[in-house]
Amino acid sequence: MKIVTAEQMRQIDRECIKLGTPASMLMENAGKAVAEETRAVLGVMNQQHILCLVGAGNNGGDGLVAARYLHEWGSKVNVYLCSQRPPDDSNLKLVQERGITCIEAANDKNLKKFDDLLASASCVIDALLGTGKMRPLEGVFRQVLEKASATRNKRKLTVIAVDLPSGMDADTGAIDPACLHADTTVTMAFPKLGMFSFPGAERVGKLKIADIGIPPKLSASVMTELLTSEWAGATLPARPLNANKGTFGRVLVAAGSINYIGSAYLACSGAMRVGAGLVTLATANSLQPILASKLTEATFLPLPESQPGIISAEAADVIKQQCRQYKVLLLGCGLGQNPPTAEFVISLLSKKELPALVLDADALNILAKTPDWWERLPGDAILTPHPGEMSRLCGLSIDEIQSERIGVAGKFAVEWNKTIVLKGAYNVIASPDGYCRVSPFANPGLATAGTGDVLTGIIAGMVAQGLSLADAACLGVCVGDEAGEIIRNVLGDAGMIASDLLTALPVAIKQLKTTTIGSES
């Protein structure tokens, strides 16, 4: 599922019309999709009073079509025209022919009629602006949106946005203060880039993507995609009946220090719980007995220490001697940044013939202090930074990164020739070929210590099972986020801890397999 900018959407619309699909048919399909979703949300139609806010452009046309269908299905529908429609507007004429009340804001002194309509409405359809260039909301647009917002804060009022909430930038997620909080946004053909950037992402509500008849081939050149459960289910590694542990790959995890023992446990467990055949933990010698009591299924490679619980520089040679037995090396979770450990990381990464690399946490923090660090890592590797780590790696502020997560991750994945998993709400996965994939999930329950270690372990486990680095990163995010949703559905979005995810991971994989089977039947 591609994610588009406003300009890309306009170009796709133009190409679709050139291929022979009339603009009127696209609008009819869009409006009907909005009506169908409104019916799905509200239930029994004859008990609903629906107020449709209509602007001047195509977004308003979609709203008029929706109003017509909802009226036909038995709802009490009123249309409030915040802008003058074209004199030959066929959709407005069809609405008027059916006796649907249409009130022009220009003829509504002090918005008295609007206030009366809003007072009886159970649902507001926001069809004012759509994906056009965002401008400050003024005049009647600001007034009606502010009034609707105030009403929604006082009582139950369902808000359905057409394409995206009015006052939200389709590309950046920036919002006007008057932008309504939608309960559901019905977006046309493809989700828009700004829907996965804050603060706009909080105004979207539940996102529904409507098929309005645009051929998928018209989006072939778009290089930003939304991850889907169908894709994830189809990409899961095969599990043949005659498998042995070697079939599913070996993961070597170099992690942990005296202050961050749990990181090593979580990373190893994440890899094991997604099906890796064997996981070996390389950690400071004095920590091995502690972690062995928790990781009963793992094997161990005790490493020399500079002091108790701190890996020494000499450990790089120990790991290098063992590397050829493993499909992937996960490096960084909870290592700390003591000088001997930093020397260990730099020395290890300078070795030749290492397996596939997944780098997280302190491995990234140590690299960030090394000029042109990416040139020390020939070829691709998976980097899994949170915004703070990404800031140290690329030199941008956290605010700059968070304001344009997809663009920043994409830029540096190409520049560094590395696969980047930029963690956070709506995880972004960017690969050196210029493609960016975005997770559809934002789960505040995952904003807790250790969940990043679990995710990195999941990704390493997927690499071990033979996936490409890009697919392993994407699938790891899908599985981890699916597990987070499973836990949130049970516990809510507060109080979740990282280890809760571990037993949910096999369940998430099972669900993704079921999704694929269901989509094929």
Image (cartoon, rainbow, N blue to C red):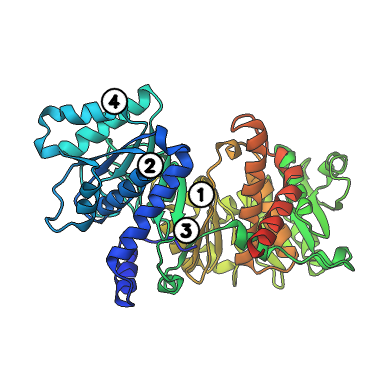
Task: Say which label, 4 or 1, has the lower sequence index.
Answer: 4
Amino acid residing under circle 3: Ala
Task: Say which label, 2 or 3, has the lower sequence index.
Answer: 2
Amino acid residing under circle 2: Ile
Q: Which structural element holds mark 2?
A: strand
Nearer the camera: disc 2 or disc 1: 2
User: What is the CA distance from the residue labelled 1 to the residue labelled 3?
Assistant: 12 Å
Q: Is residue 316 left or right of residue 209?
A: right
267 or 102, nearer to the observer: 102
User: What is the CA distance from the residue labelled 2 to the residue labelled 1?
Assistant: 22 Å
Q: Do the residues under discs 4 and 3 have CB atoms within 8 angstroms? A: no
Q: Which residue is mark 4?
A: 119
Amino acid residing under circle 4: Ala
Nearer the camera: disc 4 or disc 3: 4
Q: Which residue is mark 2?
A: 160
Nearer the camera: disc 1 or disc 3: 1
Point out the residue furthest to the top here.
154
Q: Which structural element holds mark 3?
A: helix
User: What is the CA distance from the residue labelled 4 to the residue labelled 3?
Assistant: 46 Å
Quadrant occupied by the C terminus: bottom right
Q: Do the residues under discs 2 and 3 have CB atoms within 8 angstroms? A: no
Residue 338 appears anywhere in the view: no
Residue 228 point in image, percent of width and height: 57, 58
Nearer the camera: disc 4 or disc 1: 4
Q: Which residue is mark 1?
A: 426
- Give residue 409's mark: 3
